[in-house]
Amino acid sequence: MGYLFELLGEQSVIEPVYQEEGIGLRVDGRITDLDFKDLGGGEFIFEVEGDIYPVRIATSGDSVFIHSEGESYEILAINSLEKVVEEARGGSSSDSLIAPMPGVVIRVEKKAGDLVKRGETILVIESMKLQTVVTSFRDGLVRSILVEEGGGFEKGSVLAVLASDEIEEDQL
Amino acid sequence: MIMFAKRDQEAAFATIILDGLSGQTRRVRLMEKVLIANRGEIAVRIAKTLRGMDMKSVGIAHEYEGETPATRCVDELIVLRGDSPIAAYLDAKQILEGARERDVDAIHPGYGFLSENPNFARSTRELGMTYIGPSPEVIELMGDKILAREFVSKEGFRISPSEEEEEDPLSFKERSEAIGFPLLLKAAAGGGGKGMHIVRSAKDLVGAIELAKGEAERYFGDGRIYAERYIENPRHIEVQVMADKAGNCLHFFERECSIQRRFQKIVEESPSLALDKKLRRKICSEAVGIAIAAKYENAGTIEFILAPDGEFYFLEMNTRLQVEHPVTEMITGRDLVELQIRIARGEELSIAQEEIKTKGHAIECRVYAEDVEHDFSPCIGRLVDVREPVAEFVRFDSGVAKGSDVSADFDPMLAKLIVYGETREEAISRSVESLKQTSFLGVNTNLAYLSRIVAHPAFVKGETDTGFVARHKLDLAPKELSTKKRRMLLAAAALSNRDFRERVEAVPEPYASIGDWSN
Amino acid sequence: MMRRIRSQVDVRSETFQRYRTANRARISEFRRRQEQARFERPERDMERLSRHGKLFVRERIERLIDPGTPFLEFSSLAANTEYGGESKSASSITGIGIVSGREVIVRADDPTIKGGAWYPLTIKKIVRCLEIAIENELPVIHLCDSAGGFLPLQAELFPDKYLAGRIFRNQSILSKMGCKQLSLVFGHCTAGGAYIPSLSDYAVIVRGTGGIFLGGPPLVKAATGEVVDADTLGGADVHTQISGTADYAVDSEVEALLLGREIVGQWTRGEKTQIETRQPEEPFYDSSELYGIIPDDIKTQFDIREVVARIVDGSYFHEYQPDYGTTLVAGFAHIWGFKVGLLGNNGVLFNDSSLKAAHFMELCNQNRTPLVFLQNITGFMVGADYEARGICKDGAKMIMVQSCSEVPKFTVMINGSFGAGNYGMCGRAFDGRFVFSWPNHQIGIMGAEQAASTLVDVKVRQLERAGQELTDQEVEDIKRPILESYEKELSAYYATSHLWDDGIIDPVDTRNALGISLSASLNAPINETTYGVLRL
């Protein structure tokens, strides 16, 4: 099974093709003939199927950012296991941040209508004298925060809800 | 040119020899340390001039912000506290307290934030500091769109036909209809495109009034609105003026800012192709007239709507430095911030209008962190890599650097690219080249969109008006990615992804060399 | 460093073409049978598989191993001649592959054949695969989905030393040796099968379909009257939350496989045994030319060097004692960069060829050079002259040195393996790490003709003592059943069916199979070689 990458909302499978000289890649089932030169400082020259692309590349976490021909692209490396787990737990609850344990809310950092990046702190909870940061599991918009600072909650309660799609984002 | 400055005993004034040759002197306010009540690119830009004038700069930043180019380029920094970063920048009391503690002589407000807040200007003065900008009274007058229009109209300048709701709310609908459609409903206290509604027919008017009033209340805490004639596809022309205490007022020619999205300018240029010599003279002298009438002081901008038929109407006056001021600087060779400071400390404008000349053509492109494909909605994230354009005739005013967090707390403008050319064509081609060279990685930006605008045949021909972006929507949309390029991007990404590389390189020999084989 | 073999084969010759046609036919027959074993399943079973949201066993393996990497499958045609052919690949897949960069043994049940029930040959295949793990110190990943022992044949799979119990014994020994085991429980692990995850270091179980129990619901009901469903009895949540028999509960097979990959990624990679290596290179001579070298008739002689030239790196070969004992060719070469000592047959083994083999193997042991045997042997030379010269004694030296060798040994049965030649050249009984056969290969105590003639001869002598003679018809009646049964039992398919080897391979795959085998073998240390008492 290959490795998943997402570009412009579409996922692609990339598999290594081991060759005598380095590694080739199979992208979406097609062997991609490629070569590259590292110019240093994040600048590369990629040669793909005969075309030359000077690019600038930077990475951050699971994202790879590429600037090419005046356009910038973000390619997200998807951990297949994480994706499968998310899909399995998914469905209607996928927009909700669920309390992993009972506790009290220490701090609410976002409010309804805020844009959040995946991994950004939404609120901080405390349980058994241990503070836990509750972060957004994806990029999106906070639809509602269902708890207040100082308030308590049970395991499994919904702490916050993200807006489910872009339509909602537009409305706000 | 300042040759010599000597501090007086009372320390509030200094004698400055203005002209080294004649030895002419004048007592002016001492200004050694200036607080920049702003952030981002404009703070950096102001600090640059202060450094050039041998003045100390004091910056402000909210405690959550961390290091930014703006905090790095100042001599001192006041760290503000507050519930939110934006609230801190609007917290006049805290900023003024900090300014006093640091023994600041003057405050430059930049644009946005407190730059058009008359109370801030007033308090600054009351605390014995110089406010680099106009008087609180003018800020107050021009800050109220309705009062401003009334004033300008009373002074005999042209404004587009309009009606205020407040005058007589019951007849507002009828009065508005009398102006004729299409109409533009605006908030009296508005700005930045918020709370504006275009109404094309009588049946939509009542609903739009309700909506506009509600928004005005929500956004500006002031529910007053007015209706004005909406001019289809107008050009947005503004004139830069500069006036001193002595009543000298000069204009620095026009800027055309017709390329807008969401009622916000994104590409500005000067000179405007829409003005011939005569019209330019007319519009510029009208701007100077308005400034003089208002007893204006320091830098200001008078905005006009230029209809396709050549008629123009006063739109509003901005009582501060504009975002797009570098366009003027580039073609006039004048440092507007330096002039602001000199005027603020009491110097007179010693040049004549005729001495202000323009040369060549300048274009500014505003780089925003936004998603052009989703209605230009702001984007946030961390800039993991920044490449600024490096070329002759290219100025890049940026408020961010590698590692900067672009948050939803502030305006999403990251930087401005200002390009000069002997001709407009040259400025365009240099702009396109520089935009392609520039890269901000980590956050979506409108860089590619800007280069599509500037390279667009209609832009090249000078067919610019405020409807440009909507009219050329399809042309300006990103072209679909070819499958080949998609493969290149994915391949490059995979090879740059540490996890992928580690997994792929973990395969030992001879397995890797044998590859995809089974018996 | 070595001279290249100069091939004498004329690829345009009529003989080459004829052989190639014959061998290509053999290969397509082999591939046909393999395809059948791999993919032909009763529709009912495939339907049930998809109804339960399960993946086909081969898909499970494909998703488990690292993309773009090889998989060396063992005994793909195990059990092909038994049980009416229904236990495809002996209902189980075993092989070596790469998971998260680690060299591992994969062992998978096949639930599309009688619910994954273990036939006697399934047991033999599993036991052998765990033996490979033990000998080569490899971790094992079990993909569990089996109904347990095939009850109608219990006597053939349960009681003896190398039957079912040996699986669990081997699992325990592996654990003692420090070889990790991971079980991914996709289906039921019933009865003995329950010990597979229980004896593993890590166990992942799929909710809904996975189950681990000593007695399944029907057996529980019969034994104690307790009525309980499979999930309550031994489902994922029971074992991961209450009993602790399994470690991770997952919601799907894909999740189990991905989690399994992550678990394997946590295993420490040990240092491998170092031997002489060089940068690998393809053989100078195209390996597909092997098809034109192996004769269409087993009795036709061919030069083993031509085979060597198409297996080893760069076709380089340092031949040892080129002029002594010439029916045995010995020498050094590299396979996928690994230095090996090769022994191949160019005819019957004489006294000198046996001594040469013994001497060469001693050198390899001292050199820590793994041994590769290319078997094409009719046996040791017989006759009064040879007995007088001590052919038994010399053959014994070869067998003793070969048996006591501590370097890893690999055997490829390339054409024929008859009589004591099989012993000298490291037949199955001699603990070679891996034994592979080519589809044309024949193996037996002697050829069919010789066996039939020998038996006729015995009968003739019995009758002679009674003053009788055999008619031609009687000779024919004795010969025919012998020829028939030999024809069947000498075949590579029969041999592989009974796990006498680790699988039939296409000759062109020999280099890769040996490369992976060599790499795998180096996970175990090479001990110092000591010998028994040689009859000199």
Image: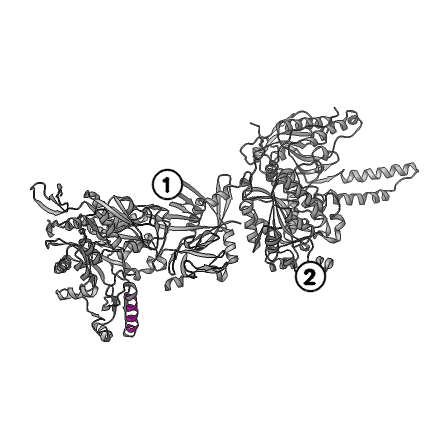
Tell me how many marks there are: 2
The percent position of residue B359, horizontal first and vertical second, equals: 17, 49
**Camera-side residue: B327 or B414?**
B414
Instruction: Determine if residue B319 is in view.
Output: yes
Q: Amino acid at mark 2?
A: Val
The percent position of residue B306, horizontal first and vertical second, equals: 20, 62
Q: Quadrant of residue B166?
A: bottom left
Q: Quadrant of the N terminus of chain C?
A: top right
In the displayed structure, B470 sits above or below B360; it is: below
Judging from the image, the colouring scheme is one colour
In the displayed structure, B395 sits above or below B376; it is: above
Left or right: residue B69 versus residue B330 is: right
The percent position of residue B246, horizontal first and vertical second, equals: 10, 53
Range drawn in magenta: B203-216
Q: Quadrant of the C terminus of chain C?
A: top right
Name the outermost residue toward the right: C467
Instruction: Determine if residue B429 is in view.
Output: no
Q: Are marks 2 and 1 on the same chain?
A: no
Q: Quadrant of residue B48?
A: top left
Q: Chain of mark 1?
A: A
Q: Dot 2 corresponds to which residue? A: C227
Q: Chain of mark 2?
A: C
**Dot in front, 2 or 1:** 2
Q: Is label 2 in a helix, a strand or a loop?
A: loop
Label annotation for residue A41:
1
Given contact means CB atoms under 8 Å apart, are the residues at marks 2 and 1 in contact? Answer: no
Q: Amino acid at mark 1?
A: Gly
